[in-house]
Every structure is written in C-alpha cells, then in structure tokens.
Image (cartoon, grey):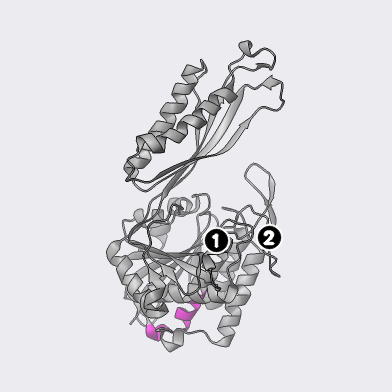
Amino acid sequence: MTTLPAPLRLNDAARARMHEDYRHLHAHPELSMQEHETAAWIERQLAELDVPHFRCGGTGVVAVLTNPETPDGPVVAFRADTDGLPIAEQTGLEYASAARSALPDGTQVPVMHGCGHDTHIVSALTALRRLHAAPQVWQGTVVFVFQPGEETAAGARAMLDDGLWDRAPRPQVLLGQHVMPLAAGSVFVTPGTAMARADSQAITFHGVQAHGSQPQASIDPILLASHVVTRLQGIVSREVDPRDMAVVTVGTFHAGVKENIIPASAEIALNVRTYSSEVRERVLGAIERIARAEAEASGAPAPTFRRLSSFPRCHNDPEHAEAVAGALRAELGEQNVTAPAPFTGSEDVGALADAIEVPMVYWFFGAFTGDDPESVPGNHHPGFAPELAPALDTGHRAALAGLLAYVGR
C-alpha cells in the first residue's frame, strides 16, 4: 500500500538511481569526522538539482529545499548521519567495502557501513529528489542535515558549533530515522525517551613499577584496577533504583608489557547507559568515587579521568510522535507501526533539536525479509547487510511520509 501522492512515487529510473547511489556509498565508507568524499559526493547530487547547500561542521552538508511555489509554509528539518565504522566487512556482497583508513591515533583499520548510515543518506536524498520534482504536493521548506560523526557523538556538536541554526532556517520540528534488523516495511516510533544517554571515559590508575619478584616494592595498578572493575558492577545492583535503567560496561583493560614487570600504570575504558539525567549523574559520581577510593586504599596517587564521548538524550515529543506515527501508519499499514520500549543504544541527533528547543521525532525502520528478520546480524556486526531494495523502499517512503505530515498540502 502507499498513500504518497503519485508525483512522489518512484518510477523505474528513480528507483535504479536510488539503488546505484546505495551501492556506491556502501562500497566507499569513511570514518567519523573523516567523511570528506562522502560530503563531496552529496554536494554533487545537490548541485545537480541546483539545491542551495553549505558545508557545516567540517564534513557535514546542509541542503535547504524551499518550495518555489509556496515558500511560506512550515519549516521542517530531516537528519541523516553519514559515517562508517572501523569494521572489516564480511557480508559477501558484490559491493562490499574494501576501504581502509586511519583512526585518530594513526592505527590503520578497515572501514564498513556497519550501522546502515549509507541507507540513511540514500533515503534522505531520494526523499529530497522526489520533493524537488513535485512542488505541487507540498509547501514550505525542508532542511536536510547530512550529519557526520554520529558514531563518536562529535558530529552534531561540530555542526552546532559551526552555527548550523544560524545559517539554516530554524525548523519547527526535527525528524530522523535509523535502519534496524526489523522486518522491511515496519517502523518503531517510541514516544518520550527513545534511546539512552551514553557516556564513555577512560580511567588511568597510577602505581609504582617494580620487578615481578619484588611486589613489596610496587604499588600494583593492575590489582588496583581489577578491584575497581569488580566494584563497578555493584553500582547498578546496589545504588540504582530497580525501577530505573542503567548499564555500566568496562570494555577495555590495558596494562603492562611483560609478565615479570609490575607496570607503572593501568587503564580501563568504560561505557555508561542511562535514560534519565538524575540516574546518569548518580552513576557517574559513583564511578569516580569508587576509582578514587580504591586508589587511596592501595596507597596510590589519584587516578586520571579522560572523557571519550557523551551522547545526549534522544527524546520524542509525544504529541509529534503520534502525528508522525499516524502518517507512517497510513503509508506502511496500521500493523507495521508500533511503539516499543526505549532502546539502550544511543544517538547524538537529540542535540540538534535540544539546542534550539524544538520537538523531535526519531524512528527505526526495518530492512529485512524472511521468517525471522530480527535474527540476522545486527548493527555494528561485520555481517550487517540491509536488503537493498526493501530497505531503501521502507526508508525513503518513511522519510516522505514523516515530512508530509508537516509540509504536505
């Protein structure tokens, strides 16, 4: 089924162009804040349509599509993220990525669109092309934000720091979407909290180096850090109300270079997920308290804390979420649009809306067929491979339906 006006529906040529775009982007991913070729490619597509656009935040691109017939209508923003991940692709696709690049520390890594951001770019660009070709069915202005650096939470902040909303028309609402291992044609729209806040940090513990045979001459940072790792597991179970959500994960532990040397330092890196700001502050405070107390108990100097990333809230305005969900139900079918519990994953899209205090609606769309679409390799997996045709069909239709809820005539 489809309720899209006939001029917005894809003809064979437009569909083939959409698929071609996807294959190109999937084969040429770039790491966060390094999306130089991706941004240039997007700019070429916009220039081809003569759509005004500008760079923002280094590798971000903003397109301002104003209806020439009815320019005074609503202003809506639509965000699509553009970065890939340091993953070696194992999908077996004929257009699989063979790209490699360097992390900020210089380490060479393979690169893959392992979270589907190529799907997001193409869905948004296809929606832009259809609106550009059919001014008779909509009104106002749509600001398409092609945002870099979502995976590191750096991109939204970079665009805001570069004056995004001083340079682009301020929207009445911000929309966005994300592909997930769900059935093609289905959409999740959760009112209120949609995703978790996330905070990552590294903690370095300082000790005194010594020979492994003379532990009495050392302050062992490995033992110290191990106690901290163990104690951190008690924060959620003993300091957070069971009715609240929190996750504390220690993802890395690095220390030493030789088995018979007690090293001078040890470092752990951890990630925290929470839904509320109150729980966030409680958990982060507990982590620092425990790290400092264990260092003191070991007779060690105070540890060093280094923030790695911080993802903001992802909050769907309930009233606007219902309006968008209604448009999606009309386009995709009543049974295909549901409102699940919040995800514990994180996104930085909320920063774009919160910065100017406008409502946001962010949804998830499916990309897989078969009897059990949720059993396929998911986001951030080397085998993550949205099925091209059904993924892009759902993605661009959902984008258009959401936008038409505001700018449709």
Residue name at image x 61 percent, y 14 percent: 218
Provide the major secondary structure of the magenta segment: helix
From the top left corner, tell me how far across and down residue 380 is, in percent.
Answer: 57, 56
Indicate which label's residue lies in the foreground, 2 or 1.
Answer: 2
- Which of these two is toward me, 177 or 92? 92
Residue 401, above or below 86 = below
Q: What secondary structure is marked by label 2?
A: loop
Label drawn at residue 90: 2
Residue name at image x 62 percent, y 21 percent: 264
Residue name at image x 64 percent, y 22 percent: 263
- Type of residue at label 2? Gln
From the top left corner, tell me how far across and down residue 254 is, in percent.
Answer: 62, 33
From the top left corner, tell me how far across and down residue 1 is, in percent.
Answer: 43, 84
Residue 201, above or below 187 = above
Query: Does 259 sit left or right of 317 as displayed?
Result: right
Query: Does 322 sit left or right of 215 as displayed?
Result: left
- Which of these two is toward me, 102 or 283? 283
Q: Quadrant of the C terminus?
A: bottom left
Range shown magenta:
126-137
Mark 1, other Cα within 10 Å: few <14 / some 14–19 / many ≥20: many
Residue 5, above or below 84 = below
Decide which of tag 2 and tag 1 comes sooner along the chain: 1
| Rendering quarter of residue 337 | bottom left
Disc 2 and disc 1: Cα gap in Å?
A: 20 Å
Question: Residue tagged by mark 1?
Answer: 82
